[in-house]
Amino acid sequence: MKEAVRSTIIAALVFMAIAPLAFGATTLSPEQIRTLTEEATIWGFPVVENYKLLSFAFGANEFNTFYHTTKLKSAKDREVVTPNNDTLYSAATLDLAAEPMVLHVPDMGDRYYTFQLVDMLTNNFGYVGTRATGNKDGWYAITGPGWKGKLPPKIRKAISCRSRFVLVLGRTAVSGEADLPNVVKVENQYELMPLSKLGGTPAPAPPATDLLPYKPEKAQTLDFFGYLNWLIQYHNFRSGDQALLRKFAHIGIIPGKAFDPAVLDEPTRKAMEEGLAAGLNKIKERSRALGRNVNGWDLAPIGVPYFGDDYLFRAAYAYKAIYVNSPEEAYYPIANNDGNGQPLDGAKYRYILRLTKENLPPAKYFWSITMYDAKDRMLVENPINRYSIGDRTSGLKYDGDGSLTIHLQHGSPGPDKKNNWLPAPNEPFYVVLRIYGPSEKVLNGQWMPPPLERVK
C-alpha cells in the first residue's frame, strides 16, 4: 500500500513539473508566456490546420478508404485553400496503429499521376507516382511508427512514417472535361488495403481511440492548444521537436493532455491570447513572402527536406497552400504583386502575362496558372467557369512567334482575347503557377517567371 501511495505521489509531482499551467503554478512572467505561446502557435499551426481535412475522416470514422473527386475543383469547393484545377484528387486518411497499409496503382500508361504522403506535421515523407516510382503496375507499403515486420515479395517499396495518421493525397492529370470519364476509371482501380488482407493473415485489432470533434471557430481561440495536445500524441517526434516540446510543456502543451483555457488565471490567459494572435499574424505575414521575390513572384527555396526546421515557413505554407508538393514533384511560384511590386487587384486594374517561346514554363509533364481570391484563398467564381489556364487549355492562342499572352482581369478582354482570359475577382487576388515535373533550370534557379504587367 505504501509503495502504491509513493508511486501516486511521484506521478503527480512529475505531472506538475511538466504541466504547471494546469495547476496555475507557473513561475513564468507574462512576457515569457507570450513568447512561448507565439512560438508554439507557429510550430503547431500546420498540425491543427491539417486536422481541418483529417477531421472529415475522423468524424465519419472512415480510415484507410479512398475518397475520389470526379469533377475538377471549382469555386463551390471550400475544403482546402489554394486547390488545383488540373487534376482529380484521391484522398485517404490512414490509421497505421494496427498494421501497415498497402497502396496499389494500376499500369498508368502515359498519364501523369502522383500520390503525396503527408505526415501529421504536413511534411512530405514519401511519394508514389510517375516521377517517383514510374507508371507500371505496383504495390507499395506504408508503415507507421515503430512497426517491425516482414513484407511479402509483391511489395515493390516500403515507405515508413513517424505519424500514426497519414494523409495520402493523389493527383491524376485531367486533359479537360472530356477526359473526366477516363480518369474516373483510373481512380476506380486505385486500391488501399491492410497488409494482413494482402497476405491473407488475421488482421490485428486497432487500439481504441477517442476522437476529438473539430470546430473551425475553436481553432482561432486558445482551444487551438487543446487540438494540438490531442494530435501530437500520435507522432513520433525527432530530437529537435522533442526539445521544443519540453519548452512548451511550461505553458501546458503536452501530448495527450487536455487543455482547458477556463482554468487559467487572468494574466496567463491574456498573455497566451496575445501570443496566439502574434503567432497567427506572423504566419499570415510570412505567407505573403514565402521565398525570394522575382518579378512580383514568390519563388520558394529549394531543399530536401523541404521545410526542415523552418517552422514559420512550414506554417506559412499550411496557411497559404497546405499540402504543397515537394519542389522536385511540382514547383509553385506565387504572384501576390505585379512587376512593380504593387498588390494584384482585379477591382482596380487589368493585367497581362507575356511568355515568350523561350520563356514558357519548362515542365516535363505540364504547367498551369490558377486564380485565387486573396481574402479566402479559394478559386474565383466567373462567367466562363475557368479557374486555371495552361499548356493544356483548349483553344489557347499563341502568337506567330510562339509566344503566349495571358489576360488576367475581372471583365472580358474581348472576343479576340477570350481564349487566353483567366478571370479575376473584383477585388485583390493572387495566382499560382504550377510546374509539374520542373526542369533542372527551375530547380537551380536559372528559369524565372516574367512579371504580371498592368494594362492601361
Image (cartoon, rainbow, N blue to C red):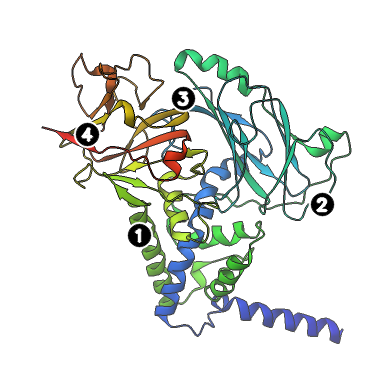
Residue 157 image offset from top left, x and y in percent: 73, 39
Query: What residue appears at the point 71 percent right and 25 percent down from the top-left corner?
Result: 137
The CA span between labels 3 and 4 is: 23 Å
Which numbered disc, 2 or 1, marks the residue closer to the eye? 2
Gap in Å between the C-alphas at discs 2 and 3?
A: 40 Å
> Where is mark 2, residue-wise?
148
**Where is residue 371 drawn, in percent x and y?**
33, 33
Q: Earlier in the sequence, mark 2 or mark 3?
A: 3
Q: Is residue 257 left or right of residue 262?
A: right
Q: Look at the numbered disc 2 and give the secondary structure of its residue.
A: loop
Q: Are the residues tagged 3 and 1 within 8 Å (C-beta)?
A: no
* Place of residue 202 in the rendered image (x, y in percent of width and height, measured from the top left): 88, 39
Q: Mark 4 or mark 1, which is nearer the start of the sequence?
A: 1
Can you name the residue that lies furthest to the left here? 456
Residue at mark 3: 72
Tags 2 and 3 in contact by the CB under 8 Å rule? Answer: no
Find disc 4 in the rendering and name its residue: 426
Q: Along the line of sight, which residue is nearer the eye, 294 or 56? A: 294
Residue 173 versus residue 18 in the image, above or below = above
- Residue picked out by circle 1: 281
Q: CA distance from mark 1 to mark 4?
A: 25 Å
